[in-house]
Structure formats: C-alpha cells, structure tokens
C-alpha cells in the first residue's frame, strides 16, 4: 500500500474554483474520510486523486511517485461508487472475476481470488445469483468485492451507503471498516454524514468550499475544532453558539448570564467580544448551576434525551443521559464543563 501526498492541489471548472490549494499527507494503511456539506469539493478531490479528474494546479504522489498526469489504470486504484454499477446479465461470480479476466489472469488465480473475497465479505452463498436477486446491502458487498479482488494500492469510496436504509448502513459501514483492517489497505472515503466520518476515520479531513478546514484524528477534531465551521459541522447534536464577552474569569452571555470559564479554557483578554461554543454533551444539570435553561421540546432517544430550549434569547440544545427528560416549560440550572471560544469576525478558535 502507499502514502498519498497532495501538494497545493487546485481544481477549477471555468472560473469556478472547486478545490483551492490543498496540501495533505495521508499515511500508508490509513482510513481517510473526506467530509463536508454538499458542494464542498470532497467528491471532486477524490476523483482527482483517482485520476478521473485532471488537477488544474499542484501535484499528487503515491508512495513518493508523481502520479499527477497518470491515467486511473496506472495509479492502481479501485473505486466503489454510490451506484453499484454491477453487470446485470452476469452472476456475482462473473462480476467479481470480470476485471481479472480483462487483465488475462490465469483461471486458477481468478478462481482463488474470487473465493477469497467471497469468504471475506460473507457472500459465498450468492456467487451464482444475478444482481436482480440481491438486496441493496448484498449488491454493495459485491461492488466492494469487485474492488478488493484486484488488490489495488488504494481503495476509494464515494458515498457508498447513500442508497441503503439506516440498518443496512450500519451493517455495511462495519463491513467496510473490517475489510480495511483485514487488508491493511490505504482507503479514502467520501461522505456528508459526520457520524459515518467519526466512526470510520483514522484521519478526518473537513472541507468547506474547496478549502481544507482541519485534518486530524476524529476525536481531536471533535474536541479541538480549528474554527466555528468545524465546530458546528462535527458532532451530533451540533454545537451551540452564543454571543458573549469575557469578564474576569467568566464569559457574560446576552441577558447578563455569566458562565465560569472551565479549567483549560484559553486565556482571553477581559472585555473581548467572543462567540461561545458549547457542545450539548458538555453541560449537566446542577442546582448550583449559573446557566438558566428554559425547556421547549424533549426528544427521547432511548438511552439519552436531547432537550431543546433557550438560554436567554439564544436557542440552545442539551443532551442528557437517561430514559426520561424534563418537562416542557421547566427551567433547568446548568453547569458548563467545557466550552470553546471563537473570534466573532474570523471564526477561528481562540487558543
């Protein structure tokens, strides 16, 4: 497998800039997830790495080898798309074998690899069926198998779970991660679903409008977002944002509510105006809490509840463990265990 390096990669379609000077290094055997809102450039970046799109500027290296101008077949990559793209007139066995047949591999090699991949993905009992006789999850496994059987240097997935129902999404997501770990592959995966991104990634790449906002391990990106965009995009429920002003060892919110700055909060000059970010899971109910939270709606999710309401005039969401939540109209006293401060003009996190 290979390390992948991007050097100032840009892509323009006419006057429209889709990717803007992206620098990144994806370690050998890592599982890299490109995540962002629709239109952020993540699929275009994947296609540039695969060679399906030609970069406008910059370079791409696989294992130290410049592949910027190489065709996809010369980069040794395999892709799994949102659409399964299986040959409907071929059995699962032929779908898996077809790419190797085109390469004129020996029949014994083809049969051995097909059997190996079928066992890995637990589709041995499906080999003689046609795609029309498969469920969505089974078709996606076959599409994955067709990529695996080639033993490429890099696996690429472009939103492969979008067509599946929630239960199948969870199942196939586990299959994809298990496959990656078993094969020791370098994998690049595109999704707009930040839950998928957090659970799958070794390396998380957050994009917005063609620019990388942050690269890092998922938990590091979650706990130490580089800016307000990352803070609001990564995490569910989304981070709360409130206008505030630093006063001594507290931050004063609209309406005069003061929140003590938790230990570890970066030092900021008194009087500075800031945007305060508070994750729903970083608050707790406490009779001595200084933040008054008026409950407007309670979502019960089994093991925990999401509580929607207001802190002063600001919309606020809190997440609590337990099977039952507070009542609508109730006022809770909250303690904030962790908060983030952002520059109100640039959105950059204050460190």
Image (cartoon, rainbow, N blue to C red):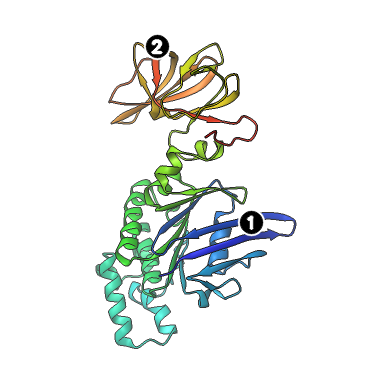
Instruction: Say if 34 sits above or below 332 in the image.
Output: below
Q: Quadrant of the N terminus?
A: bottom left
Residue 330 has which mark?
2
Tag 2's secondary structure? loop
Seen at 62% across and 51% down, the residue is 210
The residue depicted at 43 percent of the width and 21 percent of the height is 297
Identify the residue under disc 1: 21
Q: Would you say 140 lies left or right of 39 here? A: left
**Nearer the N terminus, badge 1 or badge 2?**
1
Side of 306 relative to 214 (left or right): left
Q: CA distance from mark 1 to mark 2?
A: 50 Å
The image quarter in which residue 319 lies: top left
Q: Position of residue 61 (x, y in %)?
A: 53, 69
In the rendered image, the vertical position of residue 258 relative to residue 323, given as above or below: above
Label 2 crowd (10 A; few <14 / some 14-19 / many >=20): few
Quarter residue 229 falls in:
top right
> x, y (%) of residue 323?
28, 25
């Amino acid at each position: 497998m290979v390390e992948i390096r991007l050097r100032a990669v840009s892509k323009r379609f006419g006057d429209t800039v889709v990717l803007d000077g992206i620098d990144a290094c994806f370690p050998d055997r890592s599982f890299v997830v490109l995540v962002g809102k629709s239109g952020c450039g993540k699929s275009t970046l994947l296609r540039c790495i695969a060679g399906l799109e030609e970069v406008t500027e910059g370079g791409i290296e696989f294992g130290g080898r410049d592949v910027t101008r190489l065709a996809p077949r010369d980069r040794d990559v395999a892709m799994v798309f949102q659409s399964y793209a299986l040959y409907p007139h071929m059995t699962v066995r032929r779908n898996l074998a077809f790419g190797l047949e085109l390469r004129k591999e020996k029949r014994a090699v083809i049969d051995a690899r097909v059997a190996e991949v079928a066992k890995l993905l637990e589709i041995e009992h499906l080999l003689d069926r046609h795609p029309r006789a498969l469920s969505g999850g089974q078709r996606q496994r076959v599409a994955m198998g067709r990529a695996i059987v080639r033993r490429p240097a890099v696996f690429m997935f472009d939103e492969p779970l979008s067509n599946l129902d929630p239960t199948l999404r969870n199942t196939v997501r586990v299959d994809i991660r298990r496959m990656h770990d078993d094969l020791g592959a370098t994998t690049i995966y595109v999704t707009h679903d930040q839950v998928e991104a957090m659970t799958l990634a070794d390396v998380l790449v957050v994009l917005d409008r063609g620019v990388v906002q942050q690269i890092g391990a998922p938990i590091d990106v979650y706990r130490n977002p580089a800016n307000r965009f990352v803070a609001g995009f990564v995490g569910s429920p989304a981070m709360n944002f409130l206008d505030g002003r630093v006063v001594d060892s507290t931050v004063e919110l609209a309406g005069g509510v003061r929140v003590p700055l938790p230990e570890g909060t970066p030092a900021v000059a008194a009087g500075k105006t800031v945007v305060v970010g508070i994750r729903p899971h970083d608050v707790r109910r406490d009779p001595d809490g200084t933040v008054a939270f008026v409950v407007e709606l309670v979502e019960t999710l089994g093991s925990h509840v999401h509580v929607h309401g207001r802190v002063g005039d600001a919309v606020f969401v809190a997440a609590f463990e337990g099977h039952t939540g507070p009542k609508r109209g109730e006022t809770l006293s909250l303690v904030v265990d962790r908060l983030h401060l952002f520059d109100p003009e640039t959105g950059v996190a204050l460190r």
